[in-house]
Image: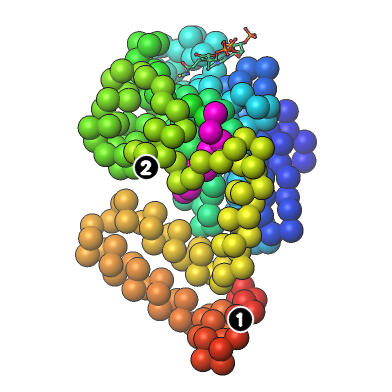
Amino acid sequence: MEFSTLIFEKQENFAIITLNRPDKLNALNNQLFTELDTIITKIEKDASIKAVILTGSGDKAFAAGADITELHECDSRTGKLFSEFGSGVMARLENLSIPVIAAVNGFALGGGCELTLACHIRFASNNAKFGQPEVNLGIIPGYGGTQRLPKIIGKARAMELILTGDLIGADEAYRIGLVNKVFEPSELMAKTIEMVNKMLSKGTLALSAAVDAINASEMLSPKEGLDYESRLFGRTCGTNDFKEGTLAFIEKRKANFSGN
Ligand code: COA
């Protein structure tokens, strides 16, 4: 399937989605969200895809935000729909039961930053810049920034970033826990793939259960969350991967997981 705003590449057991409007710094327009939504459905239906990497094309931007030319046309009614559409697509990405990793290769501003927040893990190149500059446009973040950012970096830091619209570099993003690791631009993709391969060498059913359980921690009460974890733990104990993983430990050899 061909897409005009995204590149979808399927490797052996993971997929790479590249935001592909480099002349517009990969700004997120309606077409891009529609295509991303289609790709998420495709990934949900393809059991051979066990992880997703999201990145931006070109060497300047992951995504410089929602497309401001489209945004400019909004009024209060359509603005709400604009927000709900992008926000819904990002929630679908976040709720995939496989690891979703952002490889942030430049500007991640506004909706671009929010898209990285919907990913489970963020790796960045040392030239990446993060920010929620919406207040400069007279609006607030509309794709989950006010909800996810405080959970990731804490309320006071989220307030500061969102209320000032300031941009921060990759080192500061690392210092405040916004990104997991920082690499040279030339190393970003290789290191991200290395980490994905490391994850995929484990029991992939366990990876999915872990993603689901951690995601649930944001929606359930502590008691419900612990009950949910026990249910998923029990489910993983019924897998061949569990038998193989524990037997390999007992036999002092490397586990050979089948993903069943
Ligand atoms: N929406 C639509 N187009 C965008 C865009 C956005 N969010 N961000 C960048 N672009 C476009 C520019 O209009 C320009 O297009 P043109 O060449 O047709 O004029 C192209 O991408 C390159 O951007 P430019 O501003 O020339 O690059 P720069 O290096 O001078 O500045 C930024 C880079 C990221 C600082 C600047 O583009 C910017 O501030 N973008 C908007 C960021 C923002 O407010 N995002 C939140 C949106 S809610």
218 vs 14, left or right, is left
Task: Tell which of 168 and 118 is nearer to you.
Answer: 168
Query: Where, by quadrant of the figure, is residue 255 drawn?
Result: bottom right
Residue marked by disc 1: 254
Label 1 secondary element: loop
Q: Is residue 111 visible?
A: no
Q: Residue at x 57, y 70 (%)?
A: 202
Tell me which amino acid carries mark 2.
Answer: Gly
**Position of the C terminus by quadrant:** bottom right
> Residue extending furthest right?
2
Tell me which amino acid carries mark 1.
Answer: Lys
The colour scheme used here is rainbow
Q: Which residues are magenta?
A: 118-127
How crowded pointer 2 is (Cα within 10 Å; few <14, some 14-19, many 20+) is rated as some
How crowded pointer 1 is (Cα within 10 Å; few <14, some 14-19, many 20+) is rated as few
Residue marked by disc 2: 177
Query: Where, by quadrant of the figure, is residue 149 drawn?
Result: top left
Whether 38 is among the magenta residues is no
**Position of the N terminus by quadrant:** top right
Q: Is mark 2 within 8 Å of ligand 1?
A: no
Counting from the top left corner in percent of width and height, residue 127 is at: 54, 28
Q: CA distance from mark 1 to mark 2?
A: 33 Å
Label 2 secondary element: loop
Task: Tell which of 86 and 150 is nearer to you.
Answer: 150
Q: Residue at x 73, y 45 (%)?
A: 9
Q: Residue at x 23, y 57 (%)?
A: 221
Counting from the top left corner in percent of width and height, residue 30 is at: 58, 24
Q: Residue at x 38, y 11 (%)?
A: 136
